[in-house]
Image (cartoon, helix red, strand yellow):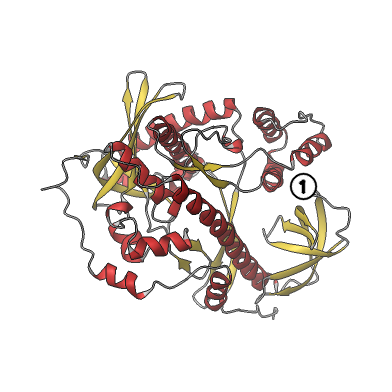
Amino acid sequence: MGKQQHTPDLHRIAREAVRDAGFDPDFPADVAQELEGLKELEAGAGQDAGVKDLRALLWSSIDNKESRDLDQVEYVERQGEGYRVLVGIADVDAYVPKGSAIDRHAAANTVSVYTPAEVFPMLPLRLSTDLTSLLEGADRLAVVMELSVSKGGEVSGEQVYRGLVQNRAKMDYESAGAWLEGRGPAPEPFKNIEGLEAQVRLQDEVAVALHELRRQSGALELERAELVPVLDEQGRVVRLEERRNNRAQTIIESLMIAANTSMAELLEAKGVPSLRRVVRAPERWPLIVKLAESLGEHLPDEPDPRALSDFMSKRRAADPAGYAELSLAVLKMMGPGDYLVEAPGIEQEGHFGLAVHDYTHSTAPNRRFPDLVTQRCLKSAAAAAPAPYTREELEAIAARCNLMESAARKVERRMRKVAAAAMLSTHVGETFDAVVTGVKPVGTFVRLLSPPADGMVVKGGRGLDVGDRVRVRLLSTDPDRGFIDFARV
């Protein structure tokens, strides 16, 4: 009989982790009071004159299988040789006015935190998974971004307006991606909804054009893998799943980047102060140059997104099996993004990894506060109303969002480590292949290639650098603290 896995109380640890990180995991009494008074807004008859009825269009969504907080729906049709693209974003602001108790709580937490045991939503579930979620078959208010996209992927003619939409089909990345890549059957909704298959094909077509133009401009094609611990009914971690990007995710990513970039440009053109999402040119660029040299490639001394993009494309073709590992190393060296304020007279950096200068977060207002802030800015621009936020207010919001997003990453990382430590508790003494993901004063960190768990090299870590491939032995695990310790072999 094998060793028994140590099963920590993941719910307790998750709640402790979010509290320690500065989040309030519970909604206060004034939020509950506001929720009681909320009613579903009348759809259709008597609707605001500024709201277009777009329910006749074949809207659909693609998201994670378990997602209930649906923020966006998509629709594409041919327009001459190009496309007319519509992205509908849940009108959260219609239910959550600026300065309300719900808004104040969202402004403090700023983001939903996802852990294996529990989700700590930014907004109460009555909103995020119901009234403001673009659920299948429900009439919902949305802020619609309409774009004209050329055959070559160039975006023009941006418009933003309020709309009434109905999501005809909620699809998931797994089944839609498998079908698009020829690995699986058609998603179930195709059988019952006329024209849906052609609609998804068209979305894929426009996404390919958008993606290719971005790639030519220097956008990075990193193979990101999301680590998802899977629990059984007893709360034991049965496996660590790696969710990799597929073609369905590329559709949504491409349409969202196009919408976010266009919204940023529109707000700038109208002189409305707003938030920008920026991934700066990597400070650790010399390390990326060194990594390229170790693979026989040359990168310029100064950060250059196009050169990095070309290098990554070349490596993907040369070594597809090792590309995920290389992507992880480059991603770590680039670092996370920050929110900054865009206002008349301020010149900000662009988004290094996306190869776009103007980029704002706006397509997930159910789970990210900056997106709700941007939504209010967009609605004011569409209605030619005064800007909802001053530059000073936005500076304070950006600082809070940067702080809490960093905190959320730490919580999610800690909980993945707790889950991984629990699962690996029966494998002490075994050896694994790993890649170095971080070198800090406190120690050297690695990610195992299989299972994809993160830990610290407590013996023999000296001299290692980010991107190095190593063989390690598991020395010990402490599931309650999320500690996994290795020795270099």
Residue situated in front as seen by the camera: 299 or 478: 299
Residue located beneath label 1 in the image: 467
Which residue reaches farthest top?
Answer: 81
Q: Amino acid at mark 1?
A: Gly
> Quarter of the image holding residue 486?
bottom right
Left or right: where 423 falls relative to 139? right
Q: Quadrant of the N terminus?
A: bottom right
> Quarter of the image holding residue 52?
top left
Q: Quadrant of the C terminus?
A: bottom right
Left or right: where 162 falls relative to 81? left
Residue situated in front as seen by the camera: 205 or 29: 29
Instruction: State the SS at label 1.
Output: loop
Residue situated in front as seen by the camera: 161 or 240: 161
Left or right: where 256 falls relative to 334? left
* Structural crowding at the residue carrying mark 1, measured as other residues with C-alpha within 10 Å and reported as few (<14), some (14–19) or many (≥20): many
Tell me if residue 144 can be seen.
no
Give the residue at x 61% y 79%. 7
Q: Position of residue 232 (x, y in %)?
A: 52, 72
Give the residue at x 31% y 43%. 143
Give the residue at x 85% y 59%. 461
Q: Position of residue 326 (x, y in %)?
A: 71, 43
